Image (cartoon, rainbow, N blue to C red):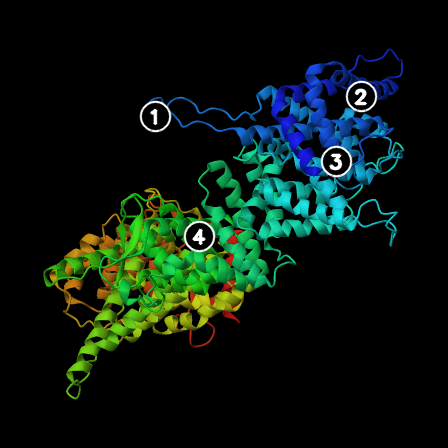
Amino acid sequence: MAAVRQAACRRVLEKCGLEQILEALKLLLSPGEGSGSNSLQITKHDVLLATLKSNLSALEDKFLKDPHWKILKLLRDEIANEAEWPQDSVDVTWHFTSQTLLLLLCLKETMLHLAADFNPGKPNPKTPETAPALSPDTLSISQQKTVQSVLQFVVTLGVCPYLVPGVGVSLRYRTEFGAVVQDVVCLSAAPSATRRLYTSCRVLLSVAQHASLGSLVFCRHFGDIAAGLCQLGFCPSKRSPLSPEEEVLTEEERALSRKALRDILDQVYQPLAVRELLILQGGPPQSCSEGKMQVRCRAPAWLRRLCGQLLSERLMRPSGVQAVVRGILEGAGAGAAGGSDAEATAADWKKCDLIAKILASCPQQSLSPEDYYRDICPQILDLFHFQDKLTARQFQRVATTTFVTMSREQPQLAAKYLLQPVLAPLHRCLSTTEIPESDMVPGTILVTEEQLSRCIEDIYKVYVVGNEPLSVLVDSLLPVLGVLFSLYCFTKQGVSHIRSLCQEILLWILGRLERKKAIASLKGFAGLDKSVPSLHSLCHFRAATQGGIMITIKEAVCDEDEDEALYQKVSSEQCRVEHLGGLLSHCQECGLTGDFFIFCLKELTHVAVENETELKMKSFSNKNLLELEQHQTLLVEGQERKLLVLQLVALLCEKMSEQIFTNITQVVDFVAATLQRACASLVHQAESTVESQTLSMSMGLVAVMLGGAVQLKSSDFAVLKQLLPPLEKVSSTYPDPVIQELAADLRITISTHGAFSTGAVSVAAQSTLNKKDPEGKREEQQQTSYKKYSDMSHSHHEPQQSHVASHEGREPSTIANQKSGSVTTEELQEALLSAYDPQIPTRAAALRTLSRWIEQREAKVLDVQEKLLKIFLENLEHEDTFVYLSAIQGVALLSDVYPEKILPGLLAQYDSSKDRHTTETRMKVGEVLMRIVRALEFFVFFPGGSDGKDSGCSAGDLDLIPGSRRCPRREHGNPLQYSCLGKPMDRGVWQAMVHEVSKSRT
């Protein structure tokens, strides 16, 4: 009997065409004529029901009266007889839906039959441009629109009204027509709602078996069909257990629904499946009550669990990560290829965080987190490498966020399955890696151009763009920093698209590392620490054919090329140092540059100490040749290290700005390094003018801080106290009395936390703040200002210092190792010319050199005493503190040798010609006179010195006030005996005198 039916159906299909079926479908969709009722709501309901009844009647009339429709009627009846679902109902909406479903089945069977009988001929090679013949089952655009409208009616009338609240999107929240349909459907009429839903879903899935019809079904209605299948296969019964008579669906039908759901999930475009499952899981708003208040119903728990399980299955499939990402992003409006909202979606970090959390969470179906990470991490890395610009931006943001999230939640697994694959090309050429013998052939490519470019780009996206300094990320990048820096140096030799990426990566990691690790890395970059992993000695970078860079094995060096290889090695090291300086110029704000500069200064101290040690030659008579060679190698390496330290210090001094130090600690460390180097120089008797100037500058910097230029806290003084031991050593051993005095003053101020501060500190600070750089030269500004800080403070404490200097001046051998007569004429002429040099540091150094020679009683120097006096007096007029204080010291020392020639002239200059000299000049001359008087050690009284009305002069030196007397032998009793406190004088002078007297009695 079944065979007879199939044969009859086949004969009918041979005669039936697509046009008649589509015309019948159009007839069912014909619009109604409307009604004249006053009630709009009733009109819509009545019009809809009347239209459905009218169209059904019109279709039946066509079947009965039109002979051309007889074949279609036979086909419909055959399919209806084979169908096992109820077709008639008192509910017009279901009767209409069932007839529409029958016609759709007729359409599918007809299209399948036409496609099976189609046999296209072979293409004519003479006319290859001719389009191939279309299959007879191909629908035109207008026919596709008709089918789409029919499917819309079937889903609206046969699926959506029967979904329970919380499953899918309710008709009431879709369109106005949907709300009308929800009201006109009669759920109490047979068949039941569940049976209707099951029938509609099964028929639609049957129609979708044809490829063309399937694309139309799933393109717009996949979500509703999936929601119906979820409800049919997984929705729990309200009452259990149900008898077979009470069950609407059998267990077999529920199993078929579950299988159909998984089949269509595997069949459709995976991002579409992910998006629809997320919508189902999210529980869109539903109306759960008939009142005005609408309650948004959440998706039922069973549906949320089901969707979560199905989403996990989508994720674990091949390319599942990409499907999940596309499903979420395209659902946000980005579109399959980016769309108009792609930029907005890429900037939506919240959405990226959501995807990252989904991807980082291990699903329940996975055996273990490690199994999950092993399967999923390669797909996450693939997200970095999309070529489409708009899609790539979104995927890279998701990949970066996922990378960081996984590293935070599972650091060990992330390091194994994410970080190791990303960093593998760099690990392959590390100095600590053993290269296989098969790759040791010269010219072998270890890392290709594509691999290296992809590696650097991925590192940039993860570390710099992600910008999460997690310990696992930082620690994993630390071993390959040497290779990264070598690559950065190579990119500086020409044009490279990865140069900026390498620089940003290096700056990022140096800023996030602990300071000790960052300094250690910089030492490795510079070549000071050979233990830091770097590029393998057999590897080198080469330009690739596509404009990138690759890593290959070096060619063997011939004997003829040894000089060239040596030159390349030296020039490469020079370039590395320069590129390191360029890199550090971007690290000043974070303080790394200052810390590395201080480290180099400390290394400079070690260099000075090591040089002295190496001068003591050891006997190698008992050494064999191998030991001698090893010793020679160590000496050469030591010399290379010293030269490298000097080169680094010179480079940093040249390139870094005056803002290299960013906090008090760095300034203190800098001063401490300078003091330690000065002490080391004293031990080895290597004191020089440059050392003296550097020491004055550093201590002047401390004087500025203590003088009020910086608001110091108690914690800052705790840092400053580390300067006390070296300052004490300098104050007791350094030969320059000016530096000795300043070191002692600084010790007092630091020890008392600023409670007792000598006037020199305050004056030096104020003078420094008011000082301007007329030439705008940075280096001169630093040297001049810092030395002015130092020596301005000495101008108020020179009396005690001069007393000590006078005694030491009479025993030159205790001050300098230079014997009398050792100064040559050329050296003297050079010093005299330098005393007029426009560069302030050079001029001041020359004046101090001349002063030292006078103190040592150099014969050639004393022969030009008149010229020296002229030079010193002219420099008294100079505005820089360092210069005029050096001149004061020189005049005082010269007067100690020839007092009878110089003292009268100075007294005359001070007492007369008052109108020609400013107060500052008279103060300077007065300071010279007081130093001379103390050095000559006799009781002095200036009855006509100052009238006390010139407050600036009087406050500058109280000994110039009329009636004041000082006993130079201060070790015998009270050093000051004043009798003029009762005399009228300026208030500032009177306060200064009271302060001085009170100090003398303590």
Left/right of residue 358 with respect to residue 897 in the rendered view: right
Left/right of residue 596 with respect to residue 904 in the rendered view: right
Tell me the element at label 4. Answer: helix
Tell me the element at label 1. Answer: loop
Closer to the chain start, of discs 4 and 2, is 2
- Name the mark nearer the viewer: 4 or 2: 2
Q: CA distance from mark 1 to mark 3?
A: 48 Å
Pointer 3 residue = 83
Closer to the chain start, of discs 1 and 2, is 2
Residue name at image x 80 percent, y 41 percent:
297
Left/right of residue 557 with respect to residue 56 in the rendered view: left
Residue name at image x 27 percent, y 67 percent:
437
Q: Amino acid at mark 1?
A: Pro
Pointer 2 residue = 52
Pointer 1 residue = 125
Q: Amino acid at mark 3?
A: Ala
The residue sitting at the left extreme is 560
Pointer 4 residue = 459
Q: Amino acid at mark 4?
A: Ile
Tell me the element at label 2. Answer: helix
610 or 815: nearer the viewer: 610
Q: Are marks 2 and 3 in contact (CB under 8 Å)?
A: no
Can residue 896 be seen by looking at this rendering? no
Determine crowd level at label 2: few under 14, some 14-19, many 20+ residues with C-alpha closer than 10 A.
Answer: many
On the image, the x and y values in percent for residue 965 come to: 43, 65
- Name the mark nearer the viewer: 4 or 1: 1
Tell me the element at label 3. Answer: loop
